[in-house]
Amino acid sequence: MAGTVAGFVKILALSKHLGHACTMSTTAPAFAATPLLRALSRELARAGGLLSPDYLESGLSLGEARCVYELGQENGLALTALAERLELDLGYVSRVVSRLAGRGLATKRAGLSDGRSRTVQLTRKGRAQLARLDRQANERFDALVARKPASAVESLVVGLQGWMLTQASVDVVLRNPRPGEIGRIITRHAELYAALGYPPEFERYVVDAFGDFVRDFAPPRDQIVVADRAGRMLGSIAVKGLAHATAQLRFLFVEPDARRLGLGHRLVRHVIEHARANAERRIVLDTASDLAAARALYREHGFRRTATAAAAFLPRGVRSERWALELR
């Protein structure tokens, strides 16, 4: 279901009704696409089992399954944030989450910084249910694709890639890393900083630092977040819980062609919100004196430089900097 149900529900939302397609316009290409999209949405709904009240024989409605999918992208999500992400009424989403909790698929707990808020998280049983739904949905759509001519599938893939990657309405989703993506995060750090003239020692530093981070990973304070748009990793960030109610922002990167999306700001805000939700009193980070854009980003969010030091893994003349943000 990851990427399949979510994507196809959005396609379904393009049409207000599931009736017959209207007559194709011969004057406006944009309107000519509408009946094709509606016809495609009906075929996807049938193939994906989206019309059944018992989605993929899981005992869940499509709405409940979609909630499971969204919760599966995070280590914990505020109930209000879940409702906003789904664009659904908060009361409805609250009732859905209560049903999921009653089935042992999710848990609700009071927010650490605000006892009135509720944070929702999938249980182990819930994640196992998500994996089953993901597998079954993929099998259904694999079967649909297998019945189509290879040339038609290739054309569809090219068209959908163009559609998904050029539409401003396509959300950048912040989610947990998938298998293999931690290695990709390390690789992109090495590649991006090598392009800036950083020495080989920097890559070894990143490998060692990420290895320590993963080995001692302790949620909910520790978190790794991937920014995903239409299945492509656009960036990532991590946060590590330290002593004395302090969180450390780590491993931020944004792909060069995604830097006009405001993604760096969004990732930093995510860490700040995560720290507040876990009752942290301070956030620290380490950066380098030559990274003007990153330093400006941190300054805009209230961080201030507190110390500098030499570092053998940085280019000659570049110093390591410690920045901090006091949370109130």
Image (tube, grey):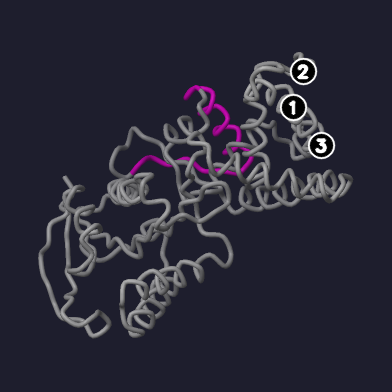
Amino acid, disc 2? Ala
Q: In the displayed structure, would residue 232 be above or below residue 71?
A: below
Q: Which residue is mark 1?
A: 36
Q: Quadrant of the C terminus?
A: top left
Q: In the displayed structure, would residue 179 be above or below residue 111?
A: below
Residue furthest front in the image = 27
Q: Quadrant of the N terminus?
A: top right
Q: In the displayed structure, would residue 27 be above or below residue 293?
A: above
- Going from N to C along the chain, the mark reached first, 3 or 1, is 1
Q: Which residue is mark 3?
A: 47
Does the magenta portion include 19? no
Crowd rating for badge 2 (residues with CA inside 10 Å; few <14, some 14–19, many 20+): some
Which quadrant of the view contains residue 148? top right
- Going from N to C along the chain, the mark reached first, 1 or 2, is 2
Q: Which residue is mark 2?
A: 21
Q: Secondary structure at mark 3?
A: helix
For discs 3 and 1, the disc positioned in front in the rendered view: 1
CB under 8 Å between discs 1 and 2: yes
Q: Secondary structure at mark 2?
A: loop
* Residue drawn at point x = 70 percent, y = 49 percent: 134
Which quadrant of the view contains residue 312? bottom left
Q: Which residues are magenta?
A: 89-111
Crowd rating for badge 1 (residues with CA inside 10 Å; few <14, some 14–19, many 20+): some
Q: Position of residue 279 (x, y in %)?
A: 27, 49
* Residue drawn at point x = 33 percent, y = 51 percent: 264
Q: Position of residue 303 (x, y in %)?
A: 17, 54
